[in-house]
Image (cartoon, helix red, strand yellow):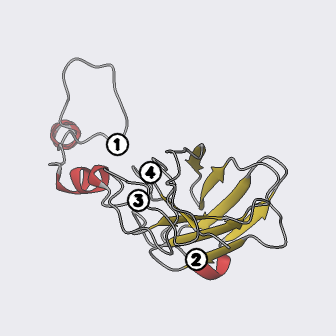
Amino acid sequence: MSHLAVPYSAKSISKTATSTSSPAAPTPVSSSNNNSSLPPAKIRHEWFQTDSFVTISYFIKNAPSELVVVDFTEKSLHVEVPMPNSSTISIDVEPLAHEIDAKKSSFQVLKTKIEIKLKKKVEGRKWGVLEGRDESLTEMMSAPKSNTGQAYPSSAKKVKNQKKNLNLYFRFI
């Protein structure tokens, strides 16, 4: 049985036990039982999020649901899909941008796709990216907070100091 490894970026498929090439420059590698290398292939995927979950869909048709293996850890995701042509598609997403609750994460194999639901460890946190370092979160944390005194957007051209106005008002009472 051959083993196909697909890095998360899904740039190519190679016949190796693990993905050793970098996702930026993947190269197909030949197997010992087959001297020809595989052409680059792509696995279409999408992801979206709610306050509680990140949902990833890998569009792989007719995957045998009883043979698909999905492993969750706090910072990684590993998917193995045995295909009818005696090969296996392997997808590794490591490291995830944020931690997940592996015990509450799940997956479902449908006719046209494999849908994976990752339970966020910190609910309400928005993920800017799925894999690697989330730069959007570090930018938000390091951005200076404006001290406008308003917790809501306003159409006023000038921001008024409400404390000062209240102090003036109570002086005259």
Q: Which mark is residue 9?
A: 4
Q: Label 2 to label 1, Cα distance in Å?
A: 39 Å
Mark whose residue sits in front, 2 or 1: 2
Residue 166, image quadrant: top left
Q: Residues within 10 Å of mark 4 (few under 14, many from 20)?
A: some
Mark whose residue sits in front, 4 or 2: 4
Check disc 3 and give the amino acid type: Glu
Which mark sits nearer the N-terminus, 2 or 3?
A: 2
Check disc 1 and give the amino acid type: Ala
* Viewer-proximal residue among 119 and 78: 78
Q: Which mark is residue 72?
A: 2
Mark whose residue sits in front, 1 or 3: 3
Q: Are marks 4 and 3 in contact (CB under 8 Å)?
A: no
Q: Residues within 10 Å of mark 2 (few under 14, many from 20)?
A: some
Q: Which mark is residue 151?
A: 1
Q: Which mark is residue 3?
A: none
Horizontal and vertical percent for residue 62?
Answer: 82, 53
Q: Residues within 10 Å of mark 3 (few under 14, many from 20)?
A: some
Q: Residue at x 52, y 80 (%)?
A: 73
Left or right of 135, for residue 108: right
